[in-house]
Image (cartoon, rainbow, N blue to C red):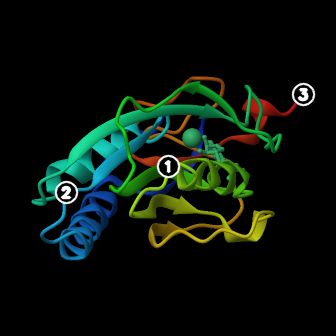
Amino acid sequence: MVELHPDVAYVMVGEEAIAKRVKELAAQLDKLYEGRRPVVVCILKGSVVFFSDLIRNMKTTLTIDFMSVSSYGNGTKSKGELTIKKDLTTDIEGRDVLIVEDIIDSGNTLYNLKKLLNARLPASVNIVTLLDKPDRREAPIEPEYTGFVIEDEFVIGYGLDYAEDYRNLPYVGVLKRSVYEN
Ligand code: IMP
Ligand code: MG
């Protein structure tokens, strides 16, 4: 048994379930990109753990790149607008792009990001997200691949943060409300 961090109310997705699902997603993506050479984009910082596990389970020849965008600040509610903090260094024109995201909440981040990347004329843009909270969707966007659909709780760990903490927890846990309320 993993010892729970004191700020975690309960584990929503455990290490073994994540590892199993990541392997399944990697196999599906290998099939999709067979014979192609996708640019796999890690959306910093939240996706870094999922991204590194995912690409190591993929057998496809691929290139990686990193992008940092923000729509959140240090709170728990989305602001809706997108700021690019770090852009890709790869020219994606004519390339197959796979966006790797940690979680889709309102969908505003990915909706704006996909629009921005499509303007650079890639051959295709697909989204794989570890987590999806469909109850909170505001923007019309659906990921092509989803690890886990979860209920509307603020989660941390496996890359996800609250005010930059908890990213290194090996599981996805629900943050105790007492940590961010009052
Ligand atoms: P959206 O634009 O509302 O879809 O927000 C997506 C981004 O918000 C994600 O990439 C996360 O960085 C952050 N986010 C949304 N929900 C959570 C959560 O439950 N825990 C941690 N970060 C979250
Ligand atoms: Mg994020």
Q: Which of the pair 150/99 is nearer the observer?
A: 99
Quadrant where the C terminus is found in the figure = top right
Q: State the image quarter where residue 98 is shown.
A: bottom left
Identity of the residue drawn at 52% across and 39% down: 160
Question: Pointer 3: residues within 10 angstroms few (<14), some, or many (20+)?
Answer: few
Q: Nearer the viewer, mark 3 or mark 1?
A: 1
Question: Pointer 1: residues within 10 angstroms few (<14), some, or many (20+)?
Answer: many
Q: Distance from label 3 to label 1 (Cα)? A: 27 Å
Tell me: residue 79, above or below residue 58.
Answer: above
Q: Is residue 88 visible?
A: yes
Q: Is residue 58 left or right of residue 71?
A: left
Which amino acid lies under the numbered mark 1 shown in the image of this protein?
Answer: Asp
Identity of the residue drawn at 19% across and 76% down: 31
Q: Is residue 124 left or right of residue 52?
A: right
The verdict on label 1 being within 8 Å of ligand 2 is: yes
Tell me: residue 8, above or below residue 145.
Answer: above
Q: Which residue is mark 3?
A: 182
Q: Tag 1's secondary structure?
A: strand
Mark nearer the N terminus (3 vs 1): 1
Q: Which residue is mark 2?
A: 37
Ligand number 2: quarter of image = top right
